[in-house]
Each structure stands twice: as structure tokens, then as C-alpha cells.
């Protein structure tokens, strides 16, 4: 018997007992395939539609859609696609809008994609790939601005691009500016920073930013309406945005600044982005434009905000939904005539996109400044959680489970079968043993059917004590009938 492992198990029990006063770490249902998802949350969708109809009456138009896993399960168009045209109907999934700063998601995906391909490193200084770029660092720390800092708004660059579409003039102006903060010390939102990132990545890739996004991201994702040109096709399919005075908003392309906000796209295109972000368990290839682990990286926080309930990633902005105890990852965008937001709930493979055909949405109409996505998710989340919990698959006994039942290490570890579950007990602490799957077929390890996943029953200790969600570890049983020993954590115990 390994004394260190014995102490670990005893300590685990003490941690669980002492942490009962801490709020339990939330657990979420497994996302399961469900056809006609809308029918399962129909009452919530009716409430959502009533809310949006009531709060959007003053807008020229609104288009909204929701995605579960890979399916669009709901869409809603309100108002007019072009209120100047009496014959115009409401905007549709294929109406093109200006998604503005949501473009930053594509720019950061470009950087991650090039990183994965070995073309660049996020720790590279910007000057390595974009030698024309420079800025004055007046602080005692003299590290150069990196690509990763640009991606997460931690570079210290000023917020806005100098008013010019001429690259030489922009870079000359920036070269005479100071950083507003030392790199990596704080979050400071920067349109300039993401524009520099996109142009640096374009130089590293050896083609224009716009061509790269088209060839490597939007085309593989079949985003048929997405692009940067305000051409005849875009004009024909455009939902017309208006200013607060009721005039059609002018449409000006951003040129050098395209990486920070120049994309035109439809709600259907944004639904395909949501579907991509829901494929975090898939390898790169085809429409999976980056590996699933890279998507998880993109959705991970880089900076914790001082308010205590939010964080910023690359470039996702994160807020904790306290009512449902779950993180929401969002990106908003605004240009004259348009305000849009995409909000994801990655743990449930759920996403919402809403665009209104007006910028400067009054705070008394949308106090959350989320283009109503927060309010919509407040309605949807309880319904989605209820449905997913109701459709959880029944527990499955591991193969060879009869061989694993027994007592090990003088009773320190006891494995028993209760109905269709294997239960492991150690010093009063119990957990379930679930099948482990070697999904990739990785070679060199023990037989996967003799490896089980431990899921602790008691999660009252909060996320910091055990694991983020359920406490999961792997237990290895030796081959034999019955299994002669078990290996867990730091020790191996023989069958009694």
C-alpha cells in the first residue's frame, strides 16, 4: 500500500467534509442529439418572441436566430428589411448585415489557424511579421507587442485606428504614439490592435487578409453571404440600416481596418459560426477550420475583469449567467445603422445571434447592451437545461464490470455494482465508475476496456477543490478474471 496515496484519499474526504459550506460546483447535462429541438423548448421560444416583439417596435428591423449543436432551431424577423420600401418584408436569415466587430472573431481564428500550421507563434513580436509596424513604449518594461496580445486586447495599443485608409499614413501616425499601458498588464479594447493583427497575419500568410478569410474560413464554412466587398451582390441582399433620425445609414468599407470590423454577413452565416464553435470535439479538416482544442483555446479567458463576473479571451467577452450558473461567451459589433451580437453557451452547444437595423440602441430599451441576447438566454437557458437533463442517456455498465467488483488494499478501495452502475468507495467517499473511451485509438497505453473514469458523487466542495464540474480521474484495473489489482493516482492495490 502506498502511504502517500492513502494520505491523499484521507485528505480528499476531509476536503469534501470541510467544504460543505461552499456552493457546489455546477454540473451540466451531456449534449445529446435531438431532432426538432424547437419543439422541446416551444414555450420558451414563444416567450422570447413576445419579448423581442415588445422591445423592438422602435427599430426599423431585427433578425434573430438560435442554434443547438449543428442545427438552426429558431429564427425570427421583425420590422422591415428596408423600411424605405413599403413592399419590403421583414429581414430573413439571408439578409446581409454589417456584423462589425464580430469580424474580430474571424481575425483571431486566422491567427490561431496560422499558429497551428507553424507559420507564426502568438508570442512573436508583431515586427517579426509586420516590420512596418512600430509604436513607442514609454514604460520601464520594454517587451515588444506580440500577436497574442493583439488578439486579446492586452497590447496597450490605443483604441481607434487613425482616420485614414492609407496604410503608410496609419503606420506613420501609430509610430509616433505611446502605448496606453504596458503590454499584458490590462485589458484595453483596441480596434487598432486587431487591425494590426490581421495585417500582420496576412503578411505572414503571403496573401491579403480578405483573400485569406475567404479561402480558409468563410468558404470552408459555406458562409455564402460573407465578405468584405460592398458590391452589387451585397447591395441586393442587404438589410438596410438606419440612423436615429430615420435616414438610411451610409455604408463605407473599412479598407486596411477590415480585420477589426469590415465583414458583411447574414444571420445564417453567423449560425454557421456558432455551429463551428460547437465542434470543439472535432479535429481540423474540411469545415472544421481549426482543431477543436484550438476552439476551446479561443473561448478561454485571458484577462479577468475587475467587476468579478467577467473575462476577456481572444476576442470573446465572457459573462457568468448567475441564474443558470453557466458562462456565456459573446462578441458584439456596431457600425452606423447596425448593432449585432453573437452569444455562445459552449457547455450546452447553444448560441444566439441578433442584429438590429439601427446603431446607438438606447439603454432604456436594452439595458444589458447585449442586443437582447442576455435577455433571450435568460429565457432559453432554463428550458434548454431542463430538456437536456430529461434526455440524458441511461448509465452503461463498463465491459468486464464483473471482473472489477471486489475489495482492494485491505478494504481501502471497494468496487460494487448498484443496479446498472459500478460504485467505488474509499474511506466513506463514493464515486461512479464509467466506461473510458480511447477516442483517437492512441497506441501504447493499457487496454481501454480496463480503464474506467471515476466521477465523484459529492461535488459540494466547489470547483476549486476538485475539478471544474465533476471530479474525474482514471482508474486502471489489471487484466484478469477477476482483476488482480487496481492502480489509482499514486498507488497500486492488490485484490483482497
Image (spheres, rainbow, N blue to C red):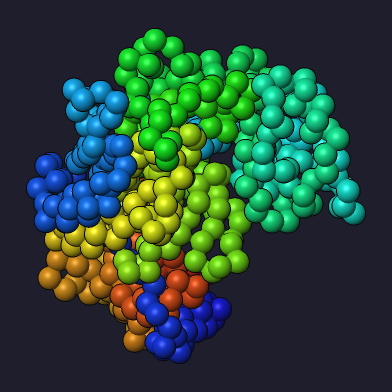
Tell me the quarter of the picture where residue 209 sits: top right
The quadrant in which the C terminus is found is: bottom left
Give the residue drawn at x 59%, y 53%.
302
Q: Is residue 321 left or right of residue 151?
A: left
Q: Is residue 153 left or right of residue 483?
A: right
Give the residue drawn at x 28%, y 69%.
432
Count of all numbered marks drawn on residues in the image? 0
Q: Residue 213: percent from the left, percent from the top?
A: 51, 22
Q: Residue 386: percent from the left, percent from the top?
A: 18, 62
Q: Nearer the viewer, residue 34 or 244?
A: 244
Give the residue drawn at x 21%, y 25%.
86
Q: Is residue 441 visible?
A: no
Q: Residue 269: percent from the left, percent from the top?
A: 34, 29
Q: Is residue 191 left or right of residue 273?
A: right
Tell me the quarter of the picture where residue 473 sits: bottom left
As drawn, 255 above or below 102: above
Give the residue drawn at x 50%, y 47%.
316
Amino acid at each position: 500500500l502506498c502511504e502517500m496515496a492513502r494520505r491523499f484519499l484521507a485528505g480528499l474526504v476531509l476536503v469534501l467534509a470541510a467544504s460543505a459550506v461552499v456552493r457546489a460546483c455546477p454540473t451540466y447535462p451531456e449534449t445529446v442529439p435531438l431532432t426538432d429541438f424547437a419543439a422541446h423548448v416551444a414555450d420558451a421560444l414563444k416567450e422570447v418572441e413576445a419579448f423581442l416583439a415588445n422591445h423592438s417596435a422602435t427599430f426599423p428591423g431585427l433578425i434573430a436566430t438560435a442554434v443547438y449543436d449543428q442545427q438552426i432551431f429558431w429564427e425570427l424577423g421583425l420590422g422591415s428589411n428596408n423600411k424605405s420600401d413599403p413592399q419590403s418584408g421583414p429581414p430573413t436569415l439571408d439578409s446581409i448585415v454589417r456584423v462589425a466587430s464580430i469580424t474580430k472573431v474571424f481575425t483571431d481564428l486566422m491567427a490561431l489557424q496560422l499558429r497551428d500550421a507553424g507559420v507564426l507563434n502568438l508570442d512573436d513580436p508583431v515586427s517579426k511579421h509586420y516590420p512596418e509596424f512600430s509604436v513607442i513604449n514609454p514604460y520601464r518594461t520594454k517587451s515588444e507587442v506580440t500577436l497574442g496580445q493583439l488578439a486579446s486586447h492586452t497590447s496597450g495599443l490605443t483604441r481607434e485606428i487613425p482616420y485614414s485608409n492609407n496604410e503608410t499614413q496609419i503606420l506613420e501616425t501609430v509610430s509616433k504614439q505611446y502605448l496606453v499601458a504596458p503590454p499584458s498588464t490590462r485589458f484595453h479594447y483596441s480596434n487598432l490592435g486587431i487591425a494590426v493583427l490581421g495585417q500582420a497575419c496576412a503578411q505572414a500568410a503571403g496573401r491579403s487578409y480578405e483573400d485569406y478569410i475567404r479561402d480558409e474560413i468563410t468558404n470552408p464554412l459555406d458562409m455564402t453571404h460573407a465578405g468584405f466587398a460592398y458590391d452589387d451582390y451585397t447591395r441586393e441582399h442587404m438589410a438596410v440600416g438606419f440612423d436615429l433620425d430615420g435616414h438610411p445609414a451610409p455604408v463605407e468599407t473599412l479598407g486596411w481596418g477590415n480585420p477589426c470590423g469590415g465583414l458583411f454577413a447574414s444571420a445564417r452565416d453567423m449560425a454557421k459560426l456558432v455551429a463551428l464553435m460547437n465542434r470543439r470535439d472535432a479535429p481540423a479538416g474540411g469545415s472544421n477550420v481549426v482543431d477543436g482544442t484550438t476552439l476551446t483555446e479561443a473561448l478561454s479567458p485571458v484577462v479577468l475583469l475587475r467587476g468579478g463576473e467577467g473575462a476577456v479571451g481572444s476576442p470573446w467577452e465572457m459573462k457568468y449567467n448567475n441564474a443558470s450558473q453557466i458562462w456565456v461567451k459573446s462578441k458584439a459589433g456596431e457600425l452606423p445603422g447596425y448593432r449585432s451580437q453573437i452569444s455562445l453557451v459552449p457547455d450546452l452547444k447553444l448560441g444566439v445571434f441578433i442584429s438590429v437595423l439601427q446603431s446607438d440602441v438606447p439603454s432604456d430599451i436594452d439595458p444589458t447592451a447585449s442586443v437582447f441576447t442576455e435577455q433571450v438566454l435568460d429565457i432559453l437557458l432554463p428550458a434548454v437545461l431542463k430538456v437536456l437533463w430529461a434526455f440524458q442517456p441511461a448509465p452503461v455498465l463498463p465491459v468486464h464490470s464483473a471482473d472489477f467488483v471486489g475489495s482492494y488494499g485491505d478494504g481501502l478501495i471497494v468496487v460494487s455494482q448498484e443496479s446498472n452502475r459500478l460504485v467505488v468507495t474509499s474511506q466513506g467517499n463514493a464515486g461512479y465508475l464509467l466506461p473510458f473511451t480511447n477516442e483517437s485509438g492512441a497506441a501504447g497505453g493499457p487496454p481501454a476496456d480496463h480503464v474506467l473514469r471515476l466521477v465523484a458523487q459529492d461535488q459540494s466542495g466547489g470547483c476549486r477543490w476538485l475539478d471544474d464540474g465533476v471530479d474525474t480521474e482514471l482508474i486502471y484495473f489489471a487484466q484478469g478474471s477477476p482483476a488482480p489489482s487496481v492502480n489509482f493516482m499514486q498507488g497500486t492495490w492488490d485484490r483482497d
